[in-house]
């Protein structure tokens, strides 16, 4: 699976933000970097919750129900 775009409509401090990964760049590897506090970990948490199918009302530190 390749992720082309991560859209955060309302997650953490983000509202209406989008991160695009250029599918035509010819690479399968992307690095996200920047100074402290702009939201890199929040975006990672959003992506993790999406991939693990954790609902939007689940506490951040808990696992999804089995």
Image (tube, rainbow, N blue to C red):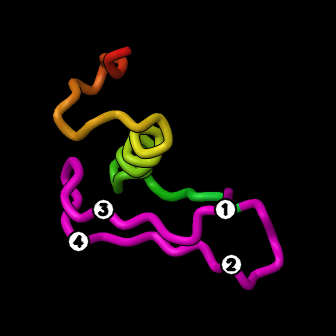
4 and 3 marks in contact (CB < 8 Å):
yes
Q: Mark 2 sits on what residue?
A: 23
Magenta residues? 1-29
Distance from disc 2 to disc 3, alpha carbons, whole Å, reads: 19 Å
Front disc: 3 or 1 = 1
**Label 1 neighbour load within 10 Å: few <14, some 14-19, many 20+:** few
Distance from disc 3 to disc 1, alpha carbons, whole Å, reads: 17 Å
Up the image or down, 40 lies above or below 28; here it is: above
| SS type, badge 1 | loop
Mark number, residue 16 = 4
1 and 2 marks in contact (CB < 8 Å):
yes
Q: Earlier in the sequence, mark 1 or mark 2?
A: 1
Left or right: residue 25 versus residue 46 is: right
Q: Earlier in the sequence, mark 1 or mark 4?
A: 1
Q: Mark 1 sits on what residue?
A: 2
1 and 4 marks in contact (CB < 8 Å):
no
Position of residue 35 measured from the top left corner of the image (x, y, whole percent) = 45, 55
Q: Mark 3 sits on what residue?
A: 8
Position of residue 24 measured from the top left corner of the image (x, y, whole percent) = 73, 85
2 and 3 marks in contact (CB < 8 Å):
no
Distance from disc 1 to disc 4, alpha carbons, whole Å, reads: 22 Å
């Amino acid at each position: 699976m390749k992720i082309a775009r991560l859209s955060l409509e309302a997650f953490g401090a983000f509202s209406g933000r989008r991160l695009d990964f250029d599918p035509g760049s010819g690479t399968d590897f992307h690095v996200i970097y920047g100074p402290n506090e702009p939201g890199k970990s929040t975006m990672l948490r959003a992506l993790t919750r999406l991939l693990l199918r954790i609902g939007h009302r689940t506490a951040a530190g808990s696992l999804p129900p089995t």
